[in-house]
């Protein structure tokens, strides 16, 4: 019933938009000339206003109605007015993209269209970004989503889409902003953002933004601390050549919190604030990235773009093991839990280079928008696992946790060192061919080659196990666009990709690659003098070899995986963005998705993949008073619906009387309210999250149960200069 009411509210809001009296404001929408003078892609769905915003991650300059693919842009204005402080906050504005888990409380696991968006699908300023740690958002200028297939542009990415985080860019005038945020759970967060030109001739500019955050939690004994800095520079080498250098660094430390509220595949009621980990536990992470982009414009129609990027991350987890894992680690019916201690470290060095040539030209009466490019990527990941300390202690999850009863911190010995180098190379070409103003085709193809290796050193015996895998394949994409008018576009797209599966199976052998077929159809509409955008998309994604982490023998290593057969995802997405009256912005969306196992070989055919809700929806409104005595006041509501889904462990068909079960998780609606006021250069913003104190959970398997935060507030004080 709740989801029916919520869906009706979205529809009614959309209908009310149709009934609004229009007003003339030519500034509500603008499209720049279709040239590659700008290196960014003009995309569709504008989240935060009804203007079209450039999307860097698309590589080619294509008008929004010409792109046969769904996408979304969350603007800086939305990030600011909604006091966004996490990826979870950001995704409240993007339907069909959601958080599927928060394992350990130190990461946000992103998913779209039924598939996980891992670090291979997460980008920052166009290069891959590690998302196995919480991501700082204060330095973001905007956030971009490219849904569906992106393999033709980026190579080995999972189906479902990609996420690109775009940081704030240099400016050629002096200015900036200082802020101080505080809120529930003793949260404090000062921020600073400064920019200016360099030199009298203003041929160079810089920007530095930084933040520090210290917080406790609604969970007892859980704390966190984070440092962040993001300097960037832009240099105009000549009238047609520019160099941009962007650096990003985050250091984060927090208490791991896996929860323990599941007994025999059922979520049990324990107080929301009860912490059941070890108080001395830690998850330390840091990440450094640097991007150098050199762009040269030959003329208004042709340019060349070179990107050199590096990324380094390092993590260390030292805590109790997850509940319900390992021998003797199950939570008993009476609440007793025999805890063990785990430790692991990971380091990764990543290097990439990318070269793109873009141009627009004509052959007779046929127009072309051409992209030709090549990229090279190198990864080297080192993972150190330690021997677990079993039988650390026994606690009862139904009793208050007392840290003073903890035994001494054990010393763990090294178990294995896994070195996993990956070398990847790709070349690609894409052309948007306009046969007429109404009929267009977007066609592209990519060839990728990947060399994947793994060396596992066993410290106890000095034995080394080596696996090697060499793969290469073509990834085509073709899309047909029909535009009955300038305000309507109907499209259909097919893409095929060859996904490399890293890791090894339970026998230590290299994993076979997957073939992914994606189909997408949709319609895009600009209505009422561009005051309303209404887009509908339907899709089907098939993965012929879907691997998941093996859970056999208490395995906790993500690189040991098992083939579960073919998986198919089908769904529909509806997006509405409108500015019906001056000062009012409305965003609404609905997504239906069903992702199933098709083969009977490992899991039950027809059973659903875990963590994915069938239905999600979002509805938010923001009203800015622009005149009168209340000028500068900003009011807003943010509401999200997250549908029913399953966690736990899927039942195996090859195990007789298998005791693994799925865990049903109820749907929920969360509502946030924002109130702000701007006077001259001062701004105060307040936010009340989870107004109705909804209780629900993010669950991974049956061993990480993280309740969503209760009702809480935040206040931001900012001065702009």
Image (cartoon, rainbow, N blue to C red):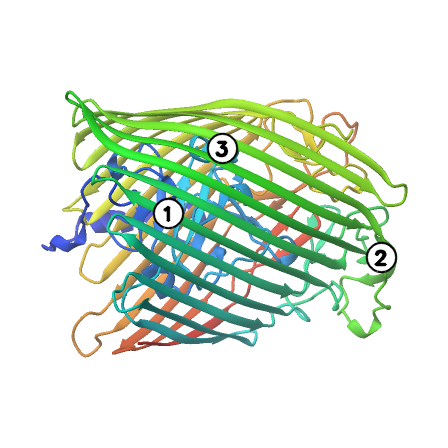
Extreme residue in the right direction: 461
Mark 2 touches mark 1? (CB < 8 Å): no
How many numbered marks have been drawn onto this rendered protein structure? 3
Of discs 2 and 1, which sits in the foreground?
Answer: 1
Would residue 285 be seen by someone viewing this image from the given angle?
Answer: yes
Would residue 40 be seen by someone viewing this image from the given angle?
Answer: no
Residue at x 51%, y 42% (from the top left corner): 352
Q: Between 64 and 113, which is closer to the camera in this rendering? A: 64
Q: Is residue 61 above or below residue 655?
A: below
- Which percent across, then down, holds residue 37? 24, 44
> Which numbered disc flags the more N-terminal residue, 1 or 3?
3
Residue at x 14%, y 22% (from the top left corner): 365
Residue at x 71%, y 46% (from the top left corner): 265
The residue labelled by disc 3 is 155
Q: Is residue 28 above or below residue 199?
A: above
The residue labelled by disc 2 is 412
Q: Between 49 and 590, which is closer to the camera in this rendering? A: 49
Q: Secondary structure at mark 1?
A: strand
Extreme residue in the top direction: 364
The residue labelled by disc 1 is 294
Mark 3 neighbour density, 10 Å: few (under 14) some (14–19) many (20 or more)? many
């Amino acid at each position: 019933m709740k989801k029916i009411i919520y869906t009706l509210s979205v529809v009614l809001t959309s209908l009310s938009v149709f009934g609004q009296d229009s007003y003339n404001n030519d500034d509500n929408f603008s499209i720049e000339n279709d040239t590659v003078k700008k290196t960014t892609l003009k995309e569709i769905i504008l989240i935060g206003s009804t203007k079209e915003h450039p999307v860097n991650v698309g590589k080619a300059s294509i008008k929004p109605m010409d792109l046969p693919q769904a996408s979304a842009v969350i603007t800086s204005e939305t990030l600011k007015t909604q006091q966004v402080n996490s990826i979870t906050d950001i995704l409240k504005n993007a339907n069909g993209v959601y958080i599927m888990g928060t394992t350990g409380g130190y990461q946000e696991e992103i998913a779209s269209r039924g598939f996980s968006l891992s670090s291979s699908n997460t980008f920052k300023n166009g290069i891959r970004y590690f998302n196995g740690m919480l991501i700082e958002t204060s330095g973001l200028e905007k956030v971009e989503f490219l849904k569906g297939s992106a393999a033709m542009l980026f190579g080995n990415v999972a189906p479902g889409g990609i996420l690109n985080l775009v940081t704030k860019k240099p400016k050629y005038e002096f200015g900036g902003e200082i802020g101080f945020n505080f809120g529930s759970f003793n949260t404090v967060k000062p921020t600073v953002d400064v920019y200016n030109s360099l030199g009298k001739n203003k041929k160079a500019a810089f920007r530095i933004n930084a933040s520090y955050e210290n917080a406790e939690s609604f969970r007892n004994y859980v704390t966190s601390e984070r440092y962040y800095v993001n300097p960037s520079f832009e240099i105009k080498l000549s009238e047609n050549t520019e160099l941009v250098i962007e650096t990003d660094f985050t250091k984060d430390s927090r208490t791991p919190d896996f929860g323990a509220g599941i007994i025999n595949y059922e979520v049990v009621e324990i107080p929301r604030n009860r912490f059941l980990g070890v108080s001395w536990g830690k998850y330390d992470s840091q990440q450094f990235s640097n991007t150098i982009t050199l762009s040269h414009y030959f003329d208004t129609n042709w340019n060349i773009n070179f990107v050199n990027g590096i990324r380094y991350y390092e993590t260390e987890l030292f805590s109790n093991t997850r509940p319900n894992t390992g021998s003797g680690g199950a939570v008993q019916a009476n609440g007793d839990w025999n805890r063990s201690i785990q430790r692991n470290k990971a380091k990764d060095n990543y290097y990439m280079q990318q070269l793109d040539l873009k141009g627009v030209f004509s052959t007779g009466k046929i127009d072309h928008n051409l992209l030709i490019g090549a990229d090279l990527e190198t990864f080297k990941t080192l993972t150190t696992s330690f021997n677990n300390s079993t039988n650390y202690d026994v606690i009862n999850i139904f009793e208050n946790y007392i840290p003073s009863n903890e035994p001494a911190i054990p010393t763990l010995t090294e178990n294995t060192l896994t070195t996993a180098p990956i070398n990847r190379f790709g070349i690609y070409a894409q052309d948007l061919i306009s046969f007429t103003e109404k009929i267009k085709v977007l066609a592209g193809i990519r060839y990728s080659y990947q060399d994947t290796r793994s060396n596992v050193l066993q410290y106890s015996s000095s034995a080394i196990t080596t696996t090697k895998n060499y793969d290469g394949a073509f990834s085509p994409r073709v899309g047909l666009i029909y535009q009955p008018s300038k305000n309507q576009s109907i499209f259909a797209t097919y893409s095929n990709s060859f996904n490399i599966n890293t890791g090894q199976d339970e026998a230590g052998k290299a994993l076979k690659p997957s073939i992914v077929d994606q189909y997408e159809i949709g319609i895009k509409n600009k209505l009422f003098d561009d005051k309303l955008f209404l887009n509908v998309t339907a899709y089907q994604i098939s993965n012929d070899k879907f691997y998941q982490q093996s859970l056999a023998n208490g395995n906790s290593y993500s690189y040991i995986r098992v083939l579960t057969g073919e998986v198919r995802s089908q769904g529909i997405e509806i997006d509405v963005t409108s500015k019906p009256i001056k000062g009012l912005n409305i965003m609404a969306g609905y997504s239906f998705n069903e992702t199933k196992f098709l083969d009977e070989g490992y899991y039950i055919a027809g059973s659903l993949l875990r963590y994915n809700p069938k239905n999600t929806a979002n509805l938010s409104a923001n009203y800015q008073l622009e005149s009168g005595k209340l000028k500068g006041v900003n009011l807003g509501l943010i509401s999200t619906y997250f549908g029913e889904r399953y966690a736990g462990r899927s039942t195996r068909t090859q195990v007789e009387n298998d005791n693994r079960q799925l865990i049903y998780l109820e749907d929920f609606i969360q509502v946030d309210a924002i109130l702000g006021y701007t006077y001259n250069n001062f701004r105060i913003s307040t936010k009340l999250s989870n107004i109705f104190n909804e209780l629900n959970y993010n669950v991974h398997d049956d061993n990480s149960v993280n309740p969503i935060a209760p009702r809480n507030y935040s206040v931001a004080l900012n001065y702009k200069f």
